[in-house]
Amino acid sequence: MALQMRSECERCHAKTPPADAAYICVHECTFCAQCADSLQHVCPNCGGELVRRPRPAPGDA
């Protein structure tokens, strides 16, 4: 099952292209690095941990 790779932060709506740093929870809620830091890496929707979203291999983005 592939990740959805959502294209914007759910909090501030900053763009989060697949090759950029973004943070996701187990439900794939997506946040930019700045929002993840200010949320202390806790998803405001489910309370789960926000972890660095894997980046695609070069050429797959």
Image: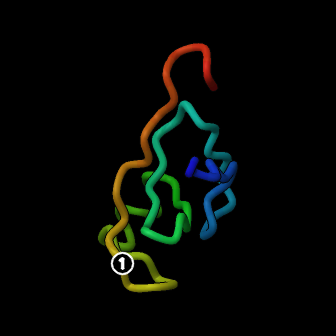
SS category of the residue bearing label 1: loop
Against 7, residue 40 (above or below) is below
Residue 43 pos. (x, y %): 43, 76
Residue 38 pos. (x, y %): 38, 68
Residue 6 pos. (x, y %): 66, 53
Against 18, residue 12 (above or below) is below
Against 44, residue 53 (above or below) is above
Q: Residue furthest front?
A: 1
What residue is shown at x 38% (from left), y 85% (from top)?
47
Against 48, residue 35 (above or below) is above
Q: Residue furthest top?
A: 59
Q: Nearer the viewer, residue 6 or 4?
A: 4
- 25 left or right, relative to 4: left
Q: Which residue is mark 1?
A: 48
Quadrant in the picture for residue 50: bottom left
- 53 left or right, relative to 4: left
Q: How many marks?
A: 1
Quadrant in the picture for residue 16: top right
What residue is shown at x 43% (from left), y 67% (from top)?
25
Q: Residues within 10 Å of mark 1 (few under 14, many from 20)?
A: some
Residue type for callout 1: Gly
- 10 left or right, relative to 45: right
How is the protein colored in the picture? rainbow
What residue is shown at x 44% (from left), y 47% (from top)?
53
Quadrant location of the C terminus in the rendered image: top right
What residue is shown at x 32% (from left), y 71% (from top)?
49
